[in-house]
Image (cartoon, coloured by chain):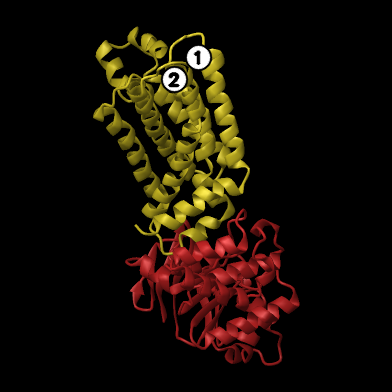
Chain colours: A yellow, B red
Amino acid sequence: MSQITPIFKREFLGYFRTPVAYVFLIIFLLASVGLAFFVGQLFKGNQATLEAYFTFHPWLFLFLIPAAGMRLWSEERRSGTIELLFTLPVTPLDAVLGKFFAAWAFLAAAILLSFPLALTVAWLGDPDWGVMASSYFGSILMAGAYLGVCSLMSALTKNQVVGFVLGLFANLVLVFLGWSVFNGALAAVFPQAIVDLLANFSHTTHFDAFTKGIIDPKDVMFFLSLAGFCLFLNVLALER
Amino acid sequence: MIEVRGLAKNYGLFRAVDNVSFSVQRGDILGFLGPNGAGKSTTMKMITGFLRPTAGTAVVDGHDVTRAPIEVKRRIGYLPESAPCYPEMTVAEFLAFIAEMRGFRAPVEKAARIRRVVELCHLDGVLGQSIETLSKGFKQRVGFAQALLHDPPVLVLDEPTDGLDPNQKNEVRAIIKQLATQKAVILSTHILEEVDALCTRIILISRGKVVVDETPAAFRARRPGARLDEIFRELTRGDI
């Protein structure tokens, strides 16, 4: 377990050794805040909440998290450094966790960097800080679940583009299952019970409560167990 | 020190390594010869615990690589073919990462370990340079430094002088020779003169099988007066 630390450190700082970190952070903030202002009508809503910011996260993550996660394993495979890594005294589990936590911490930083938005809302009105905190918490948890899926997909290929597309598609399915428009279409074919069951496996279903200020252990468990299950498969994929 | 027992590896229906057995003692430098694709690298990857053998095993310093891979990895310094290193890191950052992975976390010890290999491999001038900007010779030396950092009892070097100029080749050979008195060394090479200059034993592998296991003198005596590459060609004719 002690081997997680150096891998975490290398991986986290690795984002800042390449343009990846700066490009990612700038695009992420432009897109997330831009969506909140221009599509979510943050100011026109005339309410002191960040709902307009968080409501787009499941869609935004769909593109940006595969972009951050695709390199996790496919880059090691492509460049051959995986041979170096796995002839050091480290178990696949430690390596998977070290990389995952580093990428997760990076994503959490990207999400939390929207804090000026929260300060703006607080200056203009009187927001509910509890709702704000639970929204940030839920968003970071959900980012972990997206990332778990992407880490697994990245381990399956040595091609980063394939890793990106697989990660995007798998997460897209998980978003669609809970999207009202898609659910409506499903309900026309399947009984409601099946539609509800499928919706249970969706990012969006479990994220909604957080944005309303409710932290339900069920939702927390969903995101954690989705990430955990994917990382378990990730370890299996690396053990040959 | 190293005990290889009936090692075999299948890639699908193709048998890359077939029932390879040999042993290496402390003080030995074993020259691993063979045409490209004969199974040299695959054998080395199994000894270092990177690939799982289809059959057989390797025992390093009393630890079985199939049962205690981490213990084996602690005792081996491995230079993979073409020395893959993380390109975006500087030499100093990379060696610090390796030191931490090897368990040298205390700053004083870490610095001492790094200083030793930096001197040994003449890396002082490039410590602050990122690895992707280095010439092939320097990259190879960084890979070499990484393998020596924990002063392992066993060295496995896959083509250590590949891509070096004649001066650098001589220097690497001198280092290996100097270290080998305390260690068991396996090195693979294409350069037959190198075997003559360096090795205490030759193993020639062809189509995954050990064809020759003897001293360089005995190898030369197979056809007195002939050049080494003529003997090599004759023994590996099946590969062409």
Residue B85 drawn above or below residue B170: above
Residue B166, visible in the rendered structure: yes
Quadrant of the drawing holding the C terminus of chain A: bottom left
Question: As rendered, which of A14 and A162 lies closer to the eye?
Answer: A14
- Tag 2 near tag 1, CB within 8 Å: yes
Q: Is residue A4 left or right of residue A68?
A: left
Give the SS element for disc 1: loop
Quadrant of the drawing holding the N terminus of chain A: bottom left
Indicate the position of residue B18 as horizontal and vertical percent values.
46, 68
Query: Would you name the residue on which mark 1 appears?
Result: A42
Q: How dense is the environment of label 1, judged by Cα within 10 Å: few (below 14), some, or many (20 and up)?
A: many
User: In terms of image quadrants, where is residue B86?
Assistant: bottom right
Question: As rendered, which of B35 and A25 lies closer to the eye?
Answer: A25
Residue B199, visible in the rendered structure: no
Q: Is residue A148 left or right of residue B130?
A: left
Residue B85 drawn above or below residue A138: below
Give the SS element for disc 2: loop
Q: Amino acid at mark 1?
A: Leu
As drawn, which residue projects farthest toward the front?
A123
Indicate the position of residue B94 as horizontal and vertical percent values.
56, 61
User: In terms of image quadrants, where is residue B52?
Assistant: bottom left
- Tag of residue A171: none
Q: Is residue A96 left or right of residue A60?
A: left
Query: Would you name the residue on which mark 2 appears?
Result: A50
Question: As rendered, which of A79 and B217 lies closer to the eye?
Answer: A79
Q: Is residue A217 left or right of residue A65?
A: left
Q: How dense is the environment of label 2, judged by Cα within 10 Å: few (below 14), some, or many (20 and up)?
A: many
Query: N-terminal of the two: label 2 or label 1?
Result: 1
At a point 41% along the width and 38% down the height, the residue shown is A148
Please give the count of numbered marks on the rendered protein.
2
At a point 51% along the width and 68% down the height, the residue shown is B208
Residues beneath discs 2 and 1 located on the same chain: yes
